[in-house]
Amino acid sequence: MSAPTRLRVLHVIKCLDRGGAENLIAATLESSSSPEVVYEVAFARSDMAALVRELSSQGHVVHDLGSRSDLDLRWALRLRRLLLKHRYDVVHTHLPLSAGVTRLVVRSLGAARRPSLVHTEHSLHGENGWTSRTLRHLTGRLDDVSLAVSESNRAALPGRLRSRTRVVVHGIDLGRAQLARPREEVRRDLGIAPTAPVALCVANLTAQKGHTHLLTACRLLRSEGLDVTLLVAGDGPLRTELLSRRDAEGLREHVHYLGPRADVLDLMSAADLLVLASTWECMPVVVMEAFAMGLPVVVTATGDLPRVVTPGRNGLLVPPGRPEALAHAMASVLSDETLRSALARGAADSAARFDARRTTRELEELYGELVAR
């Protein structure tokens, strides 16, 4: 008796650095328990590959398509050769530029070789560049299924695309929270006193993430006598500018830019709250991780955050672009142990809705339906 046919899914994305979309792919693959679905991943940018070793160690095949910049589109030819060499049932795309190019590559194949196309929208359409938006307009109709990771994400799409897109709230591996190192141990390694108030920000160093507002909030907190330490995990084009501003505001000893980190959950173990000062968001993965760790959040009221953060229950919301309000909310959590403990319990209670196993089951059912058609 022959073995049952296994469904082969290829995720295609621009890069495999530690960003929100990339982490969601990793969580989906890690949480799959179906022996009938085999996942592979292809990524365009060879120079952005932080997650490759982790995915490979889990037994997933990862294809580096060899691009060194967004303008180097030779990866599209390598992707086409890959699709001709292997028979995939579903190609699942992520991020607008890589998705647009992949749609055209898939369309260039003969009908007998053409896999089903699924796309997940991770960013706000209007915040993407002109090229990405245009590609989305011109090629979006080629998707067999279009998904969005949040309601705000879907709402930002143009009407024609919005009407054919459904929301699938992605998730994370909640069990990883149990693997985080003890708070005292992490603080000792970071040189932070056991009782010092610590805020953590996990965000790329870009204008969208509102880091200048966060620096102003830290300066205000210290001027009011709260000896806060801020840890910032992430990197980006504003690093040099932010370091200069931090030093100019006398915060060199209190704000620490740690660069890209693979141990975000350990940092959360050491922190008293997660803070995001973003000017816009969809549904940040880092908030899901904070809930899994039972870590209160202080975040701006953007995207889907008002739908998942209930003030006084699992965190606090502030208007974007208001560093005074951000400082006040941070002070409320850091200086009030009773409030902090209550928010921590609420955060932990909120984690279940972001279990990646549920999302993965939903996606695998979707893949099966597409192939059955």
Image (cartoon, rainbow, N blue to C red):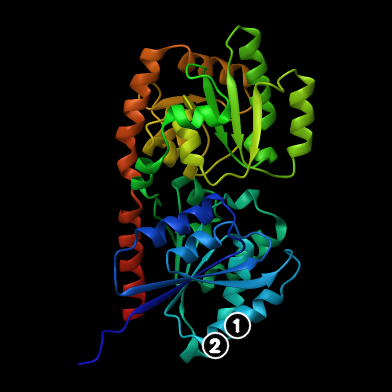
Q: Residue at x 65, y 76 (%)?
A: 76
Answer with left or right where residue 71 lies relative to residue 117. Answer: right
Residue contact at pointers 1 and 2, CB within 8 angstroms: yes
Residue 162 image offset from top left, x and y in percent: 49, 57
Answer with left or right where residue 295 lies relative to residue 128. Answer: left
Tell me the crowding category of disc 2: few under 14, some 14 to 19, or many 20 or more residues within 10 angstroms, Cα based. some
User: Which image quadrant is residue 184 in?
Assistant: top left
In this figure, which residue is indicated by the disc labeled 2? 84
- What amino acid type should be assigned to the residue bearing mark 1? Arg
Looking at the image, can residue 298 be seen?
Answer: no
User: Which image quadrant is residue 336 in?
Assistant: top left
- What amino acid type should be assigned to the residue bearing mark 2? Leu
Q: What kind of element bears circle 2?
A: helix
Q: What kind of element bears circle 1?
A: helix
Answer with left or right where residue 115 lies relative to residue 3. Answer: right
Would you place residue 239 above or below residue 359 in this image?
above
User: Which image quadrant is residue 278 in?
Assistant: top right
Residue 104 image offset from top left, x and y in percent: 61, 77
Q: Which residue is drawn at 64% across and 26% down?
A: 214
In this figure, which residue is indicated by the disc labeled 1? 80
Tell me the crowding category of disc 1: few under 14, some 14 to 19, or many 20 or more residues within 10 angstroms, Cα based. some
